[in-house]
Amino acid sequence: MYRVILADDEGIVLDSLQMIIEKHFPDQCEIETARTGRAVIELSERLSPDIIFMDIQMPGINGMEAIREIRKNNPAVEFIILSAYDKFDYAKEAINLGVLEYLNKPFSSAVIVEVLERAMHSIDSKRRKRSENLLIKEKMETVAPIIENGFIYAMLFQEYSTEDTENYKLLLNLKAEYGCMLVFVMGDDQKGSHMTNAVGAGVRTQMNYTRVRELIKETFPDSIVGSVLSNRIPVFLPMEKTRIGYEERIAMIDTCRELARRLKRSMDIAFRIGIGQIRSLGESMESYEGALKALASSTGSVAHVDDLPIQCRYDEEYPIELERRLFEELKKGAVEDCERSAGEYFDWMLANYDEQDENVRLKILEFVLWAEHEAYMNAGLDYHFSDRGNYLELVTGAEKNSDLREWFVGKFGDASRKMSAKNTVRENQLVARAKSYIQENFQKDLSLDEMSKELDISPYYFSKLFKEETGSNFVEYVTSLRIERAKKLLVDETLSMKEICAQIGYSDPNYFSRIFKKNTGVTPTEFRGGEKR
């Protein structure tokens, strides 16, 4: 059904239009008429029409003005202008107003039918698009919590790649590079900093999760809400800047207090909200931990980490953002960026402290050890106690601080490079150890399980890794070594087949003969005879 308004001050025109429409489109249109500009505007507000036939020369408010007014509340309506004036200015203005057609009076029945069919087609297209958009929105409302929880999980537990992060940001339309974590903890009641019946409250919150999420989204529309973890809900609040002022912090605390009260009224569950410091996406866990510490160190319904003496506070001139960026680039394995930031940090020290300042040397040593610690802990490297035995002598023995710049930047580059290649380095080391062990022990009854145990990794992982690195599976690789060794031993005619088998790890000469022929195309005896000739 289409809602149609016929607007003209001539009764004969209205009757003609209505007759044409009812004849050619029976039971398809709900038709209303208006004889003045004001009447068509008021009728449009009440009826919300799909199509309006509009005469330009209407008493009072003319047709063009009426179209502008109606467009404000109903931008989707299709207008068909009727005019006794074939004027270019009117037609041009009609185009600017998005009018579907400009018809000159008198008009024929065929023209009205044709233009009305086009209007109906346009309306149908808009309705389909609207229905599709609503369906997509409905699906997104179902999927959105899953995506948001995936983002929260990835940020907190660092189980993501750069590509994953960008995909999450795209799906969530997230533009900000910074944010703070809010942690909602719930219970039946609050005793000091402790929530009573945390497990029961967590279960009830899970059952009412949709409502909790709605209230959080109403309060913080841009927030990304995680799922219930025990009696906690982690929430990421995007930020455009790395710090907020005192007034903004107080406003955030007040907003969270009101949200806690709304949650209590809605579900009869007590909530406390911890607010962490603003950090980059990769440092979200630090903000999350800050929010938890704030709650543990206070008894209020809302606790902001910046209000409490539980975090390190830096001198105003200290480049804390540069420090954070430096170690974030290190963890990402962004070698060039990391070296550049290391150089910037070193230059800041030289610009603010003299060449003999011991604090600079202590900071150089501290940061290099810290960077290498990150590499050892996260890049799967083997730690050797004496690897850094000369660091102290090198740093303290420098003539001036600037002499250590190249060493400092180089150490960060090395650590970042190891982070970048962390999986490859570890895997290469494992395969190298495996090859060495096989080379030394292939003459024994060597199995995949024994090899995996020697490397302290699962057989499945070792098998997959070994095949990726060597192109052969474990059995094929061992067999190849044994066959090559057998070829050399077969040249010596003083050795019996049984002796050769013993030296290459086969206990059954018949089995050895089958394996040898399968890999070389000839039997061991034929091979020996061929070598002799």
Image: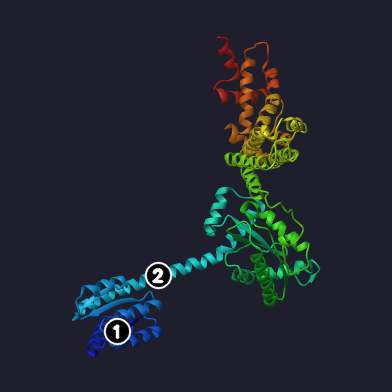
Number of marks drawn: 2
The answer to which image quadrant residue 91 occupies is bottom left
Find out whether the residues at labels 2 and 1 contact each other: C-beta distance under 8 Å. no
Q: Is residue 114 visible?
A: no
- The relative height of residue 87 versus residue 42 in the rendered view (above or below) is above
Secondary element type, mark 1: strand
219 to the left or right of 54: right
Give the image's coloring scheme: rainbow
Label annotation for residue 128: 2
Residue 151 drawn at (x, y percent): 60, 57
Label annotation for residue 6: 1
Disc 2 marks which amino acid?
Arg
Secondary element type, mark 2: helix
The answer to which image quadrant residue 203 occupies is bottom right
Residue 206 drawn at (x, y percent): 68, 68
Residue found at the far bottom of this picture: 11
Q: Given this view, does label 2 or label 1 mark the residue nearer the observer?
A: 1
Residue 210 drawn at (x, y percent): 62, 70
Disc 1 marks which amino acid?
Leu
Please report whichever mark, 2 or 1, sits nearer to the chain's N-terminal start. Answer: 1
Quote the CA–CA distance across marks 2 and 1: 25 Å
